[in-house]
Amino acid sequence: MYISKFQINNFRNFNDVSLDFEKGSNYFIGRNGHGKSNLLEAIYALSIGKSYRTSKGINLVNKDSGSYSSYLKGIAHYNNSASDLMLNIEVDKETKRVSKTYSFNSSSVSSIDFIGKLNVVLFEAKDLSIITGSPIARRRFLDIHISQQDFSYLKALQRYNKVLQSRNKVLKDIKIGKSSKLELEFWTEKIIEDGLIISKRRKEKLYKITDETLKIFPNFIFGDENLDINFVASYDDLDNLNNDSLKAIFAENIKREISLGSTLYGPHKDDFDININGHPSSEFSSRGQIRTIALALKLGEANALKNNINNSPIIALDDILSELDEVRRGTVMDYIDNYDQVILTAPDEKLLVKNPKFNGKIFFVKNGEIIDK
Ligand SMILES: Nc1ncnc2c1ncn2[C@@H]1O[C@H](COP(=O)(O)OP(=O)(O)OP(=O)(O)O)[C@@H](O)[C@H]1O
Ligand SMILES: [Mg+2]
């Protein structure tokens, strides 16, 4: 999949920008604060129907334009057909309420029918938290990946989180004599089914991502950096666990759960380990190494998604080259050249390590304007 024309109107620090993307590699060079991340935010918004950076829609409209609306338009190409996509953002002058409308092939559609028409995998600084952050970041990484392909997983996850809250409340209430073990049983039954489905699904998908990541990672390194990734569930022997054996685990731990007032087992405790040469990379890897691992993981995710949806997503990479040495920058640039389309930002053209076959298109981002080189 790739995007050809892209138009930005009154979005962030842009007024009117019209771009012709190259199928293949597109590099956006610009100094700090000139609009590079804003551009990727705009492209990604056409994929997910909203900003990945803010939930305050009003901040998306160019505040210096005097306007209360903004739009993003693109032409997406997939399987020899072209579709146009448009996202409109309107701010009510009085209430400052924001409404978004979507159109696909010039017909108005709901957000559900819009989201995912353009497949983009975005990598930005925050994604380093998959390596360095808390387990929440790693669960989120898996959940977004699985939800993109399976709406029923997202539903199960939402149900699980609600049931978990209710069950934790009952545990606390039992401790102070306000609730009974009978009520707890009801919530335990409910939590078990979705809990097992979610953890098993995460494990299965993590290993599919890992397979792809391990094919990519050696392209980025020299020497012997051995990467391994392992799913860590809160229960032992997840593969052989069923509803009955899990019920028995809950029964054994009921006293401890009541005294702590929280549910001890389940997907809310899932995590995965990322090791380099047998050591946790969050503690032993350098900044550049962490960036390389996170990038390999994210591209592994893109490749796993591609295997599933039979469509190569657009790869959007925000400032990934800055902390890498020249050799790694070269290997990364060589590797990403294989995707249908890559959109990459960098603060300095010197960071681009061009191989002899380099045929990427270079743009300059300056104060909200974008010029072709
Ligand atoms: N709603 C808005 N209206 C006008 N300008 C905005 C709006 N939102 C953000 N900006 C401006 O956009 C600029 C930030 O752009 P962006 O984050 O894309 O920079 P960048 O090129 O990615 O920089 P860096 O290299 O530091 O990451 C800031 O100067 C900010 O003030
Ligand atoms: Mg930026």
Image (spheres, helix red, strand yellow):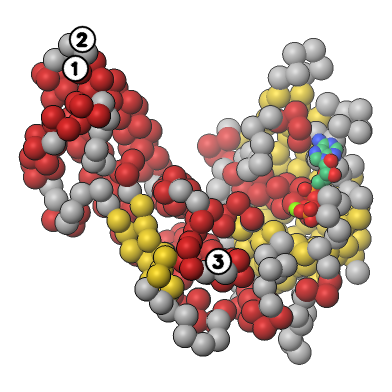
Residue holding disc 2: 178
Q: CA distance from mark 1 to mark 2?
A: 6 Å
Location of the N terminus by quadrant is: bottom right
Of residue 279 and residue 145, the one placed in the foreground of this image is 279
Q: Which residue is mark 3?
A: 290
- Report which quarter residue 231 is drawn in: bottom left
Residue 268 sits in which quadrant? top left
Callout 1, which amino acid?
A: Ile
Instruction: Look at the picture and state if 325 lies above or below 319.
Output: below
Q: Position of residue 143 (x, y in %)?
A: 42, 47
**Residue bearing the label numbered 1:** 174
The one nearer the camera, 324 or 71, is 324
- SS class, disc 2: loop
The answer for how far apart the CA atoms under marks 3 and 2 are is: 48 Å
Q: Determine whether the residue tagged by mark 1 lies in a helix, strand or loop.
A: helix
Structural crowding at the residue carrying mark 2, measured as other residues with C-alpha within 10 Å and reported as few (<14), some (14–19) or many (≥20): few
Going from N to C along the chain, the mark reached first, 3 or 1, is: 1
Task: Say if mark 1 contacts mark 2, CB within 8 Å.
Answer: yes
Q: Is residue 162 left or right of residue 126?
A: left
Q: Does 59 sit left or right of 244 as displayed?
A: right
Q: Amino acid at mark 3?
A: Ile
Kindly tell me whether residue 130 is visible in this rendering.
yes
Residue 43, x across and y down, in percent: 70, 51
Residue at image x 19%, y 17%? 174
